[in-house]
Image: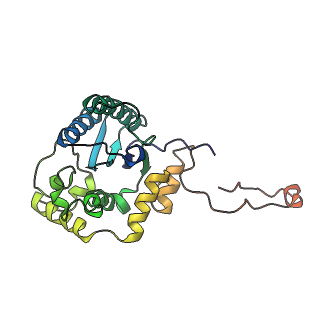
């Protein structure tokens, strides 16, 4: 079955995942991490992408980003991917592919899932057993949002600003969001949607998105389309194709 084109629409937050080929490491030491962050900053600025959250792990990374045009995210990721592979292969004396195919992504409904997605991204190093506390992992946007450092790569989403009237209030509120963690259903939904490319949100949100894209944006219901008797067609019954 041919794979669907990637779902990318301007002015909506997108959750992206890029993995190393065969889960191999894509960052060996701090210089590699720093190089990726520099490339993301450069290309996000060039293509008009607001990066709200990120985490770089040893063999994959996550981004939460809003593009200003339909081509901004693909162009940014293409430029970052190509530049980083050239750098990585030259520095580590290797050849060949580095990525596990194209990056995976999905659109998410801000009101329902944006803060949850940020927490999901922040908690990656803890889930992987790399650190005991989220703040101990240096390669994520978490410490920016909790006031431990300033990160010029990050552009806060409007929903973050609504967490409080002062920087201290926002930082404390966001820290509480992350510390509360995610329930298993939300975590699974965020993972599944990103890997499979289905939009994540309520029925009204999905219906609104579908009007803006010719690509199917949710998984089709199982089973065959309903058959309508020939007599019904002859009688003038309007048939709506199954989706």
- Which quarter of the picture shows residue 114? bottom left
In the picture, the quarter occupied by the C terminus is bottom right
Q: 179 left or right of 79?
A: left
Q: Name the residue nearer the viewer: 131 or 181.
A: 131
Q: Name the residue nearer the viewer: 57 or 195.
A: 57
- Residue at screen point 32% across, 48% down: 59
- Which quarter of the picture shows residue 167? bottom left
Q: Name the residue nearer the viewer: 54 or 226.
A: 54
- Residue at screen point 37% across, 44% down: 20
Residue 45 picture location, percent across and down: 26, 33
**Is 38 situated above or below 225?**
above
Residue 96 picture location, percent across and down: 40, 32
- Which scheme is used to colour this image of the protein? rainbow
Q: 229 left or right of 242?
A: right
Q: Name the residue nearer the viewer: 53 or 242.
A: 53
- Residue at screen point 28% across, 28% down: 90
Q: 11 left or right of 3?
A: left
Can residue 200 be seen in this snapshot? no
**Is 184 situated above or below 204?**
below
Can residue 7 be seen in this snapshot? yes
Residue 95 picture location, percent across and down: 37, 30
Residue 220 picture location, percent across and down: 61, 57
- Which quarter of the picture shows residue 169? bottom left
């Amino acid at each position: 079955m041919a794979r669907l084109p990637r779902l990318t629409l301007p002015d909506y937050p997108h959750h992206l995942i890029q993995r190393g080929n065969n889960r191999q490491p894509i960052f060996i030491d701090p210089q590699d991490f720093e190089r990726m962050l520099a490339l993301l900053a450069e290309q996000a600025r060039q293509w008009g992408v607001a990066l709200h959250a990120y985490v770089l792990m040893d063999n994959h990374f996550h981004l939460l980003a809003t593009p200003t045009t339909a081509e901004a995210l693909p162009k940014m990721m293409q430029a970052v991917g190509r530049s980083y592979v050239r750098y990585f292969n030259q520095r580590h004396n290797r050849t060949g592919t580095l990525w596990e195919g194209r990056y995976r992504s999905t659109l998410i409904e801000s009101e329902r899932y944006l803060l949850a997605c940020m927490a999901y991204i922040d908690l990656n190093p803890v889930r992987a057993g790399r650190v005991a506390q989220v703040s101990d992992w240096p390669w994520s946007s978490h410490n920016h949002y909790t006031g431990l450092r300033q990160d010029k790569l990050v552009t806060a989403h409007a929903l973050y600003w609504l967490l409080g009237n002062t920087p201290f209030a926002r930082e404390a509120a966001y820290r509480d969001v992350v510390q509360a963690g995610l329930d298993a259903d939300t975590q699974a939904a965020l993972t599944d949607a990103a890997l499979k490319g289905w939009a994540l949100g309520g029925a009204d949100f999905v219906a609104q998105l579908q009007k803006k894209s010719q690509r199917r944006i949710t998984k089709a219901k199982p089973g065959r389309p309903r058959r309508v008797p020939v007599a019904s067609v002859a009688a003038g019954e309007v048939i709506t194709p199954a989706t």
